[in-house]
């Protein structure tokens, strides 16, 4: 997932114990939408007994593996998922998306000077280039390190940045994450990664390093995107493991530190790729669409099982459940495997461009891109009053421990954000995100981290919610969010 | 640390609540050795207010860093520690040790064939050569993978091993570790690493891989030593991350798996190195020696802060405390920083050779090489009756939560094992080892993992115990253990 997702499991648990129950009680018979509860239960139970999502995820993570936009893996993923959806009887469309094509190269760094360095000794560092990083010279570069602790501090020390390797060292606030604000913790530590390199480049820095954004210190660098100014200078940029950022801080407290850095990534011309759309066409209003989605691209270090293979698998599993039960809702349910969430968001933008002139046809959008710890229920960027119309969803999902209905503003998913800004009500599964960032954007994002039963629950949540939204006699009110 | 250490924190906690107190009560005045309690308390309190051990460890981990036997780091560590001990006023001796000199090279692997592999896709693996591994051809080797789950199974499938990359896939039993048997868990999963490659080599295997031995799956390979038969065939040998071992098992369940493997380590001629001995000479019987120790060499992936920088730092800190207080015990207290614990044990053997003809002069030996979670007290490979003689040690250490006195058989430390076999009573700090193997022999063994206050406690435990053993009017009874 991207920046700016704020889900609070603490709040969620309170809601589960309290107003969740109240929601069901205050929904009178007169309010109840004309959606058959037994059908919702049938969908839930079919998802809970299906291995389709697990198979989809296994194939994606284990057989395709890493699938950064523009790579052979990304294209193999498009083929694999679209073939699987066709085989399951869905109506599949490949929507063209032009994507960035950045390729990681060699990456090595070591501390070559520091106070107390024994003769002949250097300290090897663990780091990984950020997506979009420029390359160093082929033999690497050697420069003194300037440490700052925020982008604001960097701006006040602009003159010192010239010719130096700037390390913006901001620790991920696991305490904040533990208190249910992992999205905020990510946003705080992620800002230096996202905008720091461009700021440092403007000041003439030789390179920019950030401390990895995430919890669980196992000397893993966490990659991610960085944003360059249009036409601005680009420099080498990488994430250090938390351990190595701390090492440099300790050594720098005792004297100057000099680093040798080698990064050889390449930025190639934009590549052709696709969003994969798989429809269950609506029986009454096929032109009205409820989207259920995850993103197909991943970072290149791990196999993207969590980010966001599980989201794609659960979304595809949701429409496969409807198809296998022969259930045709009032509106179209459209599963989308988005391309290029991680380093450009081009898939979400391309889809939005294709529907923006008929945006009223997009009734709702769901994206699953924040892991599946739980899931505890659903989270909607809609009003409490509107959420009450979905009380039957919570009632049916309570049977699998996923009955919480939480409302909050903002982005429900990076790919559906353009739709939400244009008024489309946005949803995500409600999950416990406290440890989501332990593995996020690292090599350790692999299939073994996924609990198959949690994936079934995630699939059930998406299937029940998507069906309900597609079956409601009247769509939900528009719920525009502010753009970033 | 090495194989075969069994410390049970659960048993320790029970002991702390129960017989620990009883020990103190049943020690009558008549039994009480003539060691001044106030002096023990002074030693404890000085260790708890000293930063000497932390400085020693910081310098070792951050400034020397990795220090595998034979490397420039190992030699820098010898110099750094001996200089520090001389500066602290200790009597320092460098004892020559000839050590193996194995140097890691490039290491890469990928799965190049498996069922369902999309065209052009391979799966990169995370692995690291085991110490003593041979090299593959410079361009790597490609071979089908044979998976077995024990050395015994490998022996029954000898004919299948020829020409294959043998993966001995044994999961580390974290449940066993959580139940206080982490040493046993390490022994079980470690056996394939230690003897598997030689067995597979004998069967004509192209290479041997083992699943990493340790908990906490963050796609970290855990290196370690493997043992070749004298004059036997040697082949490339490496540890896969747990994730990659699981990946291969999942793919192999669906069809043949072929791997490309590149490892370019080198074995160079044995190198000259040293044990560092730092003495507080005894006031009455200087020829009688109580050893307090840790090992100076580390694996090359991390900075060996835990394994075993903290052991060296605590041992050196223990004698520095005595020296700084001007305390001269009856016998000599000798801190030893052992060389080559990890891949040969040559330092322990060299010391043993130097004292074996006067082994009665070695009164006791302590080694700290199992982390410092706690520490909870002391563990002695001695009888319960002998441990009662140490009741004042427990009483004084109870003031810092380290008063448990646990007796158990076997090795208290790999370097002191030769002494123990010859009858020298052996001791180690008693620690909670449940998560010791999370970081063991990985790149993530770094200074940030060490709690400075726990290091002070560890130093206090070593200092109080070593002083007491050196001050007792009569040494403990001999306590020979069985050799392995």
Image (cartoon, coloured by chain):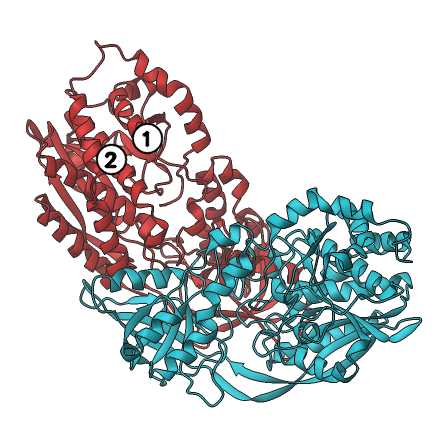
Chain colours: A red, B cyan
- How crowded pointer 2 is (Cα within 10 Å; few <14, some 14-19, many 20+) is rated as many
Q: Nearer the viewer, residue A305 or B210?
A: B210
User: What chain letter is assigned to the residue under label 2?
Assistant: A
Q: Are the residues tagged 2 and 1 within 8 Å (C-beta)?
A: yes
| In this picture, residue B456 sits left or right of residue B192 | right
Q: Nearer the viewer, residue B248 or B476?
A: B476
Residue A3 appears at what percent x and percent y? 40, 43
Q: Quadrant of residue B428?
A: bottom right
User: Mark 2 sits on what residue?
Assistant: A460
- Circle nearer the N terminus (2, 1): 1
Q: Going 87% across and 70% down the picture, which residue do you hit?
A: B331
Q: Which mark is residue A402?
A: 1
Q: Nearer the viewer, residue B157 or B186?
A: B157
Q: Quadrant of residue A24?
A: top left
| In this picture, residue A125 sits left or right of residue A137 | right
Residue B250 appears at what percent x and percent y? 28, 59
Image quarter hosting the N terminus of chain A? top left
Q: Quadrant of residue A334?
A: top left
């Amino acid at each position: 997932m991207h920046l700016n997702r704020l889900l609070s499991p603490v709040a969620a648990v309170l809601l589960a114990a309290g107003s969740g129950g109240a929601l069901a009680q205050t929904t009178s018979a007169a309010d109840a939408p004309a959606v058959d509860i037994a059908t919702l239960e049938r969908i839930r139970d079919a998802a809970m007994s299906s291995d389709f999502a697990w198979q989809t995820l296994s194939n994606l993570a284990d057989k395709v593996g890493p699938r950064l936009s523009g790579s052979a893996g990304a294209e193999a993923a498009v083929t694999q998922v679209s073939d699987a959806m066709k085989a399951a009887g869905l109506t599949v469309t490949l929507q063209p998306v032009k994507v960035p094509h950045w390729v990681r190269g060699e990456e090595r760094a070591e501390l070559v000077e520091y106070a107390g360095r024994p003769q002949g000794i250097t300290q090897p560092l663990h780091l990984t280039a950020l997506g979009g990083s420029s390359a160093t010279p082929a033999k690497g570069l050697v420069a003194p390190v300037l440490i700052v602790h925020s982008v604001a501090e960097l701006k006040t020390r602009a003159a010192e940045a010239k010719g130096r390797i700037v390390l913006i060292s901001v620790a991920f606030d696991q305490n904040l994450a533990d208190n249910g604000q992992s999205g905020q913790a990510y946003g705080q530590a992620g800002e230096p990664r996202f905008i720091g390199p461009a700021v440092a480049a403007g000041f003439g820095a030789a390179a920019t390093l950030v401390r990895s954004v995430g919890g669980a210190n196992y000397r893993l660098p966490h990659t991610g995107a960085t944003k360059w100014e249009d036409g601005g200078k680009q420099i080498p940029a990488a994430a250090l493991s938390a351990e190595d950022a701390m090492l440099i801080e300790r050594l720098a407290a005792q004297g100057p530190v000099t680093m040798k850095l080698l990064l050889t990534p390449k930025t190639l011309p934009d590549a052709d790729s696709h969003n994969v759309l798989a429809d269950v066409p609506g029986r009454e209003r096929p032109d009205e669409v409820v989207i259920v989605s995850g993103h197909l691209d991943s970072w290149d270090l791990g196999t993207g099982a969590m980010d966001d293979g599980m989201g794609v698998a659960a979304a595809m599993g949701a429409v496969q459940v409807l198809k296998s039960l022969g259930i045709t809702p009032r509106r179209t349910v459209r599963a989308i495997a988005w391309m290029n969430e991680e380093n450009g968001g081009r898939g979400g933008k391309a889809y939005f461009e294709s529907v923006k002139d008929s945006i009223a046809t997009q009734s709702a959008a769901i994206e699953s891109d924040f892991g599946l710890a739980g899931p505890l229920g659903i989270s909607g960027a809609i009003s409490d009053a509107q959420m009450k119309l979905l009380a039957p969803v919570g009632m049916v999902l309570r049977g699998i421990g996923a009955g919480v209905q939480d409302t909050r503003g903002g982005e429900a998913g990076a790919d559906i954000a353009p739709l939400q800004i244009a008024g489309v009500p946005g949803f995500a599964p409600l999950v416990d995100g406290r440890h989501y960032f332990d593995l996020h954007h690292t090599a350790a994002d692999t299939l073994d981290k996924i609990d198959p039963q949690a994936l079934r629950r995630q699939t059930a949540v998406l299937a029940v919610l998507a069906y309900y939204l597609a079956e409601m006699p009247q769509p939900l009110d528009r719920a525009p969010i502010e753009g970033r």
